[in-house]
Amino acid sequence: MARTPPPGSRRLDSFITSPPEGEGRKGEREEEDREPSPSLEVKTADGDVYYSSLAEAFERLERLSSRKAKIALIAQFLRQCPEDVLDTVAVFLANQVFPGWDPRELGIGTKLMQRIIAKAAGVPESEVTERFKRLGDLGLVAEELLKGRRTATLLSSRPLTVGEVRETFEKIAEVEGEGAVTRKMRLMMGLLARARPKEARYLVRQVLEELRTGVRENTVEEAISQAFGVSRKLVERAHMLSNDIGLVAKVAATKGDEGLREIDLKPMRPIKPMLAQAARNVKEALAEVGGKGAVETKLDGARVQIHSDGEEVRVFTRRIEDVTHALPDLVEAVKECVDADEFILEGEAVAINPETGKPRPFQELLHRIKRKYDIEEVRREIPVEVYLFDCLYVDGESLVDAPFRERRRRLEEIVDEEEGRLMLVDQIITDDPREAAEMFHRALEMGHEGVMVKDLDADYTPGVRGKKMLKVKPVLETLDCVVVGGVWGKGKRKGLISSYLLAVWDENKEKLLEVGKVGTGMDDETLERLTKLFVEEKDLIVEESGREVRFKPEVVFEVEFEDIQKSPKYSSGFALRFPRLVRVREDLGPEDADTIEKVRRLYEEILKKH
Ligand code: AMP
């Protein structure tokens, strides 16, 4: 049963409105002050929610810019939802297809979606591609194309419901094996066949996980608290520990604060990992954690979250992909070396080169972890070792609130280390920066990335990048690159050049060779400033095709990066990994930028570390 809203909150059961079909999207402004207009039925007779009313809510969220107004709208929508689908609605509103802990994926990307839309609308694929280039959003393409469809078939079909959409998503995610792509296509086309144009817009965007409603998970958290009169802090915590916004909405509605307090970690429900902030050196890092802390080797591998419910062991990546199948050796090691039934452990998986004893490049490890078939073969070729560093749950006891020193103690207690299979990361506890620095140098000598410095008294905060854990890595030299191209953004970044193609000179400074793209991680303000600089102030665009542009080589970016790899993707044969703009070098002309020789030297230096 839905709880009564808190005193003072407006109860508007019919908040969701239905503007006439076909009303243009342009020129629509804020709706904050508009009175709610005629209502649209939300609930179906059998306890489901019409997908059209959710699509309507998505559209209104897209138009609203104030966060407060978005929260109010979501809260009112949630209050109207029957209990049975409340969880799904909350998940969908948070721009997720499945709850955060659920590793299932739909496996439909932009390419496949273009084929699906073409088939559903009965047009050639080239037409979809063409419109996609123009509109920058496949949701709008589907909407436009399906508007032209004869309505007779639509009128005769039952309206779509949220429950049915969820069921179809589940079916799409579970299809595998031969003919999987065709079956996925068919299921998605089945949805589109019954969707009205606006529903199609959001179905397509949902599948691509690009709703463009500007709603983040914490917006939904706040809406849940408002809708059911529960504590914001408890909602946030319950979400962190369950990684399931749907569950949180349902519990908030049915059991209130008390129910939320009971939500805790559970094996087989992976959480978002706690993240580290960077520190410039070990001294600074130690000072951040109060002078004394744990200093651990920072291994360059892949983070794994290992869950056991007493029967089964499953392994998840930091992005909650289930990689159990690819790591049978790790599963065996865990079963043999961990003395507990139920647990959640965290560690770093690394692929060691048996000849040198040094870690292999990250790329090779990924190859192993992402492998879907011939596992036994790669298992021998690229053996994986895991170094554990945290322990979040043991036999019915959640340890997220326990200080790190206690979590490490529990880890030592339950793990019977076995060299080359399952170990604990090297750790020292110190308040002496010199001792910490020695540990740092030792780690580098052994080919590791650096060290982690951890606060011994800190609890575990899932998904938070805080100062309880700091990473210290050697600083790489930066590169001065000439910007030779860019890509116009999509969706919210439409009208902004959202990524920039970088190049360095060849040996003779005659030709520019591309080395990578920088874009992710830049905020909108920076992008606006840069777009203005390239397009208006300097007028550098010399060629445009689709969303891609070429610039006259003039502006120099100083960039940082985490690694350099050989790659056929760029004309230099190298690719910068995770490049980040440090600043625009207004003081340099294009002729002052770096050459390929420096890229090669840095590449060799990094290689030596491995
Ligand atoms: P970064 O990916 O550079 O933000 O660094 C944080 C990552 O370092 C974590 O997500 C882990 O995958 C990895 N890592 C390696 N060694 C450790 C360690 N001893 N403790 C915690 N994280 C570690």
Image (cartoon, rainbow, N blue to C red):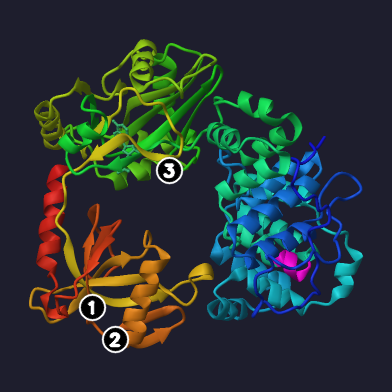
Q: Is residue 380 left or right of residue 313?
A: left
Which residue: 78% across, 68% down?
A: 196
State the CA–CA distance, disc 3 to disc 2: 47 Å
Q: Is mark 1 on a helix, strand or loop?
A: loop
Q: Is 343 located above or below residue 443 in the figure?
A: above
Say if 254 sits above or below 569 in the image: above
Residue 434 visible, this angle: yes
Q: Position of residue 58 (x, y in %)?
A: 68, 61
Name the residue that disc number 2 marks: 538
Tell me which amino acid carries mark 2.
Lys
**Residue at the disc numbered 1:** 555
Q: Give the left or right position of residue 68, taking residue 422 as reference.
A: right
**Amino acid on which disc 1 is placed:** Val
Report the disc number at residue 580: none
Q: Residue at (77%, 46%) from the top-left corner?
A: 79
Q: Determine whether the residue tagged by mark 2 lies in a helix, strand or loop.
A: loop
Residue 254 picture location, percent across and down:
76, 32
Q: In this view, does 360 lie to the left or right of 74?
A: left
Do labels 2 and 1 touch, CB within 8 Å?
A: yes
- The stretch in magenta equals 196-200
